[in-house]
Amino acid sequence: MNNKFFLYARKSTDVEDKQVLSIEAQIAELRAFAKQNNLNVVDTFIEKQSAKIPGRPIFGEMLKRIEHGEADGILAWHPDRLARNSVDGGQIIYLIDCGRITALKFPQFWFEPTPQGKFMLNIAFGQSKYYVDSLSENTKRGLRQKVRRGEYPSVAPIGYINDVRNKSIIIDRKKAKIIKAAFEYYATGNARLEDVSDFLAQRGIMSRGGKRIHKTRATFILSNPFYTGLFKYSGELHEGKYEPIIAKKIFDKVQEVLKQRGRPHHKTKYEPQDFCGLLRCGSCGMSITGEYRVKKQKNGNIHDYIYYHCTKKNKSIKCPEPCIRQEELDKQISSLLQKFSLRSDWAEKLLAMAETDKEKSAQSVSAFVFESQNKIRVIQMKLQRLLDGYLEQDIEREIYREQKAILLSEKKLLDEKMARIEQKQNDWLEPMKEWIKVVSTLVKIARNSNLQEKKVAAKEIFGSNLRLASRAVRGEPVFPFFAALRAAESVGKIPESLIVVGGIGLEPMASYTSSMRSSQLS
């Protein structure tokens, strides 16, 4: 009887760089085997899927065609290519029992459609299933051991990279800075999850589909302890052997904000919270709090007011400070903010000068790096000549070691100096731009009615230095906002060029910073 065979080849994954030669090797060997044994192969089936669980589409199609009588035999490399689970193995044996399959051919395995042959085939399928089950258990045990060593056994989150060469996790330096900034941004308590998503999107961090990260994903990022050096596996927290991005203190603050935002919060219409936590009492040093009051007139009119006053929690001092209405407090804080505002034309000039200084700095750094690289090449040539002289026995061993140590020391110093200069050449630029951005928007903030924005701006300018005494707000600005105040007060008194530029270029100078602090103290 001339059987018709289907050739079936399978590999366990559809990833191209894994087992990619397995399919080619199987087909080549099987076709050679078929030619040698005069087997009539009517079609070839290639599958790239694991046989651990039932449901392989190509395998299922092959069996349907066998049931329709298109073939009555299967040619495969080994029984484990056909089945590694009891369902698929049972289907093969059932079709043999029904007479649909009359022949199975394997180069490495004998089979005949007899009770003994089916028994041996059952054993082969059972061994294949045992191998898969055992491999799964061994893999899980290996993962548990990996976790105990502090190695994360999965795909690293945004901000990290899986290093396949060393099988470790390393920091993605570019994205890690953005993730850290997002944590710090949300920890202020003034941002929503939607704001965090926008923050990440503006800096190039999107979903895999190229869309803006959803707020649920933002929540997952902000609540993931992985960024602090801890990770969860099987519901248990483990300490990782990788560099953390976020300090535990910042992470805990973010969790506190997430928890507060997650609680049902029914804020009353007149709840006075806007300036709470911003000021302290000028007499006793206690916090300033807000209080909502309703006044009813005899004619029936009702007036709502918000007052701020000292908490008077210092029992050793009888605080004499009176309360102040929110409208008056708002007016004074707005006036203070306007003193630190920077004109838009000045902001543009400062930003342009900052970019110019950046370019000049980059040119000088490039020149230094080029010169240093030339020096390193000369040192490497000297090291090679020194080694050649030592191998030719023209130089004694002690002299060779001494000269080599000197040259390597010089090379190391040059390498470190280049790395340090390249890393720090523009460290001042981003803080400078951020400072310009803040002070150039203060006029707009001071004039609008958003009290929360005014509170944030005042906090950044004065820190914890604002005091309320005799219904008047006073406070000393923190550096570098003192510079903005000095510049603003100098308008019309000294040339604009001297106001804008305090030294050579915009890059902060130690002597310039010291002189500003001295003038502040005086």
Image: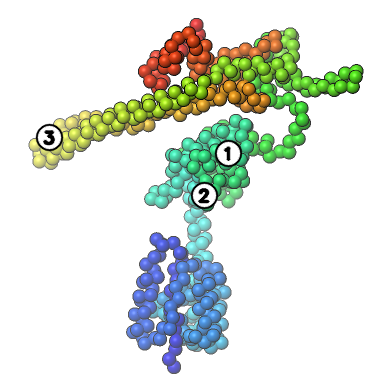
Q: Are marks 3 and 1 in contact (CB under 8 Å)?
A: no
Task: Check the image and name the residue furthest to the top.
Answer: 522
Q: Are marks 2 and 3 in contact (CB under 8 Å)?
A: no
Front residue of 148 and 81: 81
**Residue designated by label 3:** 396
The mark that comes first in sequence, 3 or 1, is 1
Q: What element does badge 2 sit on?
A: loop
Residue 60 left/right relative to 27: right
How many marks on residues? 3
**Distance between mark 2 and mark 1 Cα atoms:** 16 Å
The mark that comes first in sequence, 2 or 3, is 2
Q: Residue at x 48, y 8 (%)?
A: 493
Label 2 Cα crowd, 10 Å radius (few <14 / some 14-19 / many 20+): few
Q: What element does badge 3 sit on?
A: loop
| Above or below 251: residue 461 | above
Residue 181's spot in the image, x, y percent?
A: 52, 34
**Residue designated by label 2:** 210
